[in-house]
Amino acid sequence: MNLSGVNLSRYTPTEPIALYVHVPFCATKCDYCSFYSTCPPAEEFTRSVVDATVDQAHELLARLGRPHVRTIYIGGGTPSVLAPRIFSRLATGVLDATGQQRVEEWTVEANPESISASWVSVLADLPVTRVSVGVQSFSASAREAIGRSGSEGAILRAVEALRRGGFVSIGIDLIAGVPGQSPEDIVFDVERAVALEADHVSLYTLSLDPGTPIAGRVARGEVKLPPDEAVVEGVDAGCRRLAAAGIYRYEVSNYARPGRECHHNDAYWLLEPSVGVGPSAVSTLPGGDGTALRLTTDAEPELVTPRSFLLEHFMMGLRRARGLPSDRVVERFGAGPEDFVPRTVARWEGAGLLRCSAEGLVMSDEGMWHLDGLLSEVAAELSPT
Ligand code: SF4
């Protein structure tokens, strides 16, 4: 990222930021994954990438006037494939770059197969507050269908190791809509996460990203995805099962016990200032004039226009169960969200899929399934400038 010639002063954060740290390594590549990651990592190479990432954190945070960092999220890729001492080097280096002893929330992503006792003990020495475990499915056939390594035994051992390490806030990531998966299979995975006393569950629907092996298999007719209705039925039933266990939906695909929501991700959904370091990480720095500066590690800085940034607020904010807050939109764009797209709001409110109040815009449960349709209308109605 070349910052020479960029006037950062207009985009210097005046509120606490979210800091994302990208670890671009995985043990194996899953068949549905379009994220940037390489595997298997050679230790010398991982060390050089980690050192460059820490240097980038020091430089970027210094250039931004050392903002207060509220949350750190180390994701990937698979942070747990780093050798424990390399992971420690990354985590302590990044914390040092913040100039803080701790942050309000610190999440680390991990995959069950690479959660070793030594890795957990490194984690336990850091002020990490949450661990997000990439399970995807407890079923061997579902994991095989998406080329995901691991086993149920590894998942159970990993969660047990984290509990022994003192981690109480454990999230489990699941995926729905896998070839061969029935609605009951989706609920089975949810049941297993509840039985492990997860206090955060992500339940994303499989998307076919172009160029991935699974997209090729589906295009060639070698495998079929379950019908949309079956996925909706399974996710809705899973959502009810989670609610019965006290784990509530707070975003389209994320569920948590009260107080265990991921504040880092909420900062993204609200387009709060965020800084990303590591290969292909992205920073979003709102200005005071409706624009935002977007920095990507391996690309030139980009100025986001007020129209594009406002559209992003609809795209991200409406994913939240609490919706897109009016005050945030007024503060940044000078009017409430319904003032920019009155026809779309009236139509969707009339259909019972959206609620509009002084607090903001909130999708109904059913509306959440039609978010893409609403966003197309928002994009069409927003003035082109
Ligand atoms: S572990 Fe995650 S980042 Fe790595 S290949 Fe699989 S889905 Fe992609």
Image (cartoon, rainbow, N blue to C red):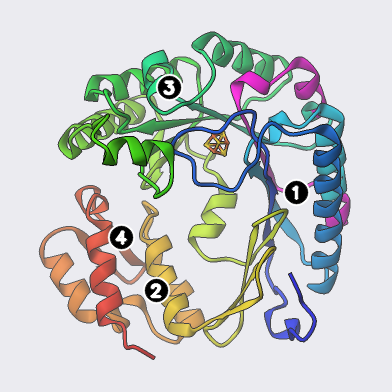
**Tag 3: Cα neighbours inside 10 Å, few (<14), some, or many (≥20)?**
many
- Closest to the camera, between mark 3 and mark 2, is 3
Secondary structure under the numbered disc 2 in the rendered image: helix
Magenta-drawn segment = 96-122
Q: In the structure shown, which secondary structural element does the residue marked by tag 1 occupy? A: loop
Kindly identify which residue carries mark 1. 103
Q: Residue at x 70, y 73 (%)?
A: 13
Q: Which mark is residue 95?
A: none
Residue 100 shows in the view:
no
Q: Amino acid at mark 1?
A: Val
**Disc ID at residue 143:** 3
Q: Which residue is mark 2?
A: 311
**Is the residue marked by circle 2 packed among few (<14), some (14-19), or many (20+) residues within 10 Å?**
some
Return the disc, 1 or 4, that comes first in the chain's sequence.
Answer: 1
Q: Nearer the viewer, mark 3 or mark 1?
A: 3
Q: Amino acid at mark 2?
A: Leu
Separation of marks 3 and 1 at Cα, in angstroms:
35 Å
Q: Which quadrant of the rendered structure holds the N terminus?
A: bottom right
The image quarter in which residue 350 lies: bottom left
- Left or right, 81 with reference to 265: right
Mark 1–mark 4 contact, CB under 8 Å? no
Q: Circles 2 and 4: CB distance less than 8 Å?
A: no
The amino acid pointed to by label 4 is Val
Please, what secondary structure does the residue beneath circle 4 have?
Answer: strand
Answer with mark 2 or mark 4, whichever residue precedes in sequence. 2
